[in-house]
């Protein structure tokens, strides 16, 4: 069989690093698109040991001519659209930009695939954020959407656009409605990585306190490596379709903090309620976790829990890493980074 070519947008991101490694192991030619920036941000590909095996090509989802030419030049057999302004918090302040990248950018890409010959299989990174103010629990492919942020609204547009190109133009196009998935390669602005990096710095005497927003928000957190396998499985199925990928378990931010603190060698006692809540290290009596209202969102997604039974039934997909294992993997990696002085002080 001829070698298959995968084009991954957003190659500098978390998921792309795991997906690139996964596809290279399956002998794909992997081409990744990146935005030109003043400083290089290829550290994730380097950590995965695949930097020299991925072909890199500059492409911005905001520039339609660029998108079209990249598709024509690469002639991919599979396109994984992972590029996005992916931070929900920022989308409230950058609503127009987020819409242009996460919604209109996807339309450019679908048009480019259609214009080539429509043969490339297409994966769109849809999200559990689309369920927002949830209408039922757990959420599956038939649960109505109620997006709660500009990020999620733009993703709903991209989701239905992908469905429409499948139905109207016959594209093999699939949407993965993925619940939160994390790893040691997660961006530091997301809550899980913020927690593990900060607790590692506190344990190594490099930081005093971890400040968080809504401790009661609940998410269905899985491991990124499990989820990129699911993306690939969707494109191997004879027909494009939409699938939820999730663990089926939901935990609060506070539970994540408790488990991570335990892995970092702390035992926390909680005092106070809501914005006055504090996590106190029992051994030293010091407050190491507190709430800062700056980190609350104008509209919150309170609780998400996914039902991935369709992906299990049709694709044979299921997650392998549990919540406890995920926290341990992330905490271990950040303790190691902190020990080597590799964690910058960031205040997101
Ligand atoms: P990530 O680490 O934030 O990566 C996003 C990627 O998109 C980065 O490479 C980023 O480039 C790129 N990007 C941003 N703006 C772009 C633009 N204008 N043109 C081209 N590329 C652009 O996100 P991730 O966690 O890997 O997530 C991958 C995708 O899945 C995203 O679409 C996200 O919305 C979606 N998703 C993620 C999760 C999750 O829990 N991780 C769940 C559901 C859906 P820079 O490095 O230059 O910023
Ligand atoms: N980032 C952040 N920082 N979130 C906090 C904090 C904080 O200090 N304190 C509490 N939270 C809460 C947020 O309010 C939210 O309810 C929850 O923690 C998770 O926030 P994030 O880790 O930023 O992720 P997200 O759920 O908003 O979005 C991620 O998952 C989506 C899938 O559901 C992103 O990866 C999205 O791109 C993805 O679509």
Image: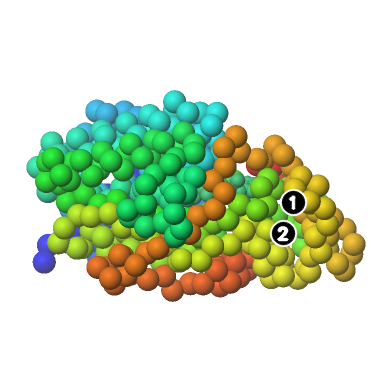
Query: In percent of the image, x 23 and y 58: which residue is there?
Result: 235
Q: Where is residue 55 in the image (x, y as percent from the top left)?
A: 31, 50
**For the residue carrying disc 2, how many other residues have a C-alpha within 10 Å: few (<14), some (14-19), or many (20+)?**
many
Task: Look at mark 1 in the image and give the residue it sits on.
Answer: 210
Query: In percent of the image, x 44 and y 40: which residue is there?
Result: 147
**For the residue carrying disc 1, how many other residues have a C-alpha within 10 Å: few (<14), some (14-19), or many (20+)?**
many
Mark drawn on residue 176: none
Q: Where is residue 5 in the image (x, y as percent from the top left)?
A: 21, 55
Q: As rendered, which of 326 and 142 lies closer to the eye?
A: 142
Residue 260 lies left or right of residue 92; in this view the side is: right
Residue 139 lies left or right of residue 107; in this view the side is: right
Q: As rendered, which of 222 and 249 lies closer to the eye?
A: 249
Q: Residue furthest front?
A: 136
SS of the residue under disc 2: helix
Q: Where is residue 259 in the image (x, y as percent from the top left)?
A: 67, 67
Task: Look at mark 2 in the image and give the residue it sits on.
Answer: 199
Q: Where is residue 336 in the image (x, y as percent from the top left)?
A: 65, 66
**Residue at mark 2: C-beta within 8 A of ligand 2:** no
Alpha carbon separation for disc pair 2 and 1: 7 Å
Circles 2 and 1 in contact, beta carbons < 8 Å? yes
């Amino acid at each position: 069989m001829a070698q298959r070519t995968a084009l991954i947008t957003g190659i500098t991101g978390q998921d792309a690093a795991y997906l690139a490694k996964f596809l290279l192991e399956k002998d794909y030619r992997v081409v990744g698109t990146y935005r030109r920036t003043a400083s290089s941000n290829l550290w994730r590909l380097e950590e995965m040991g695949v930097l020299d095996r991925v072909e890199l090509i500059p492409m911005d989802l905001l520039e339609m001519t660029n998108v079209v030419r990249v598709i024509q030049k690469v002639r991919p057999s599979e396109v994984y659209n992972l590029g996005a302004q992916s931070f929900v918090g920022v989308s409230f302040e950058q609503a127009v930009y987020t819409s242009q990248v996460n919604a209109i950018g996807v339309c450019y890409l679908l048009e480019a695939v259609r214009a080539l010959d429509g043969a490339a299989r297409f994966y769109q990174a849809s999200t559990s954020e689309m369920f927002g103010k949830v209408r039922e629990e757990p959420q599956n492919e038939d649960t109505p959407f109620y997006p709660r942020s500009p990020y999620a609204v733009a993703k709903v547009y991209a989701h239905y656009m992908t469905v429409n190109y499948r139905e109207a133009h016959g594209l093999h196009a699939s949407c993965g409605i993925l619940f939160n998935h994390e790893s040691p390669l997660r961006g530091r602005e997301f809550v899980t990585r913020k927690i593990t990096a900060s607790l590692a710095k506190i344990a190594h005497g490099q930081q005093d306190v971890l400040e968080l927003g809504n401790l009661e928000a609940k998410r269905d957190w899985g491991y990124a490596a499990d989820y990129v396998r699911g993306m690939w499985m969707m494109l191997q199925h004879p027909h494009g379709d939409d699938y939820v990928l999730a663990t089926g378990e939901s935990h609060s931010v506070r539970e994540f903090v408790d488990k991570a603190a335990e892995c970092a060698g702390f035992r926390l006692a909680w005092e106070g309620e809501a914005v006055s809540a504090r996590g106190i290290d029992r051994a030293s009596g010091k407050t190491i976790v507190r709430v800062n209202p700056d980190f609350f969102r104008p509209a919150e997604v309170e609780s998400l829990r996914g039902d991935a039974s369709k992906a299990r039934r049709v694709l044979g997909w299921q997650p392998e890493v549990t919540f406890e294992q995920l926290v341990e993997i992330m905490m271990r990696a950040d303790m190691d980074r902190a020990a080597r002085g590799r964690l910058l002080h960031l205040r997101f």
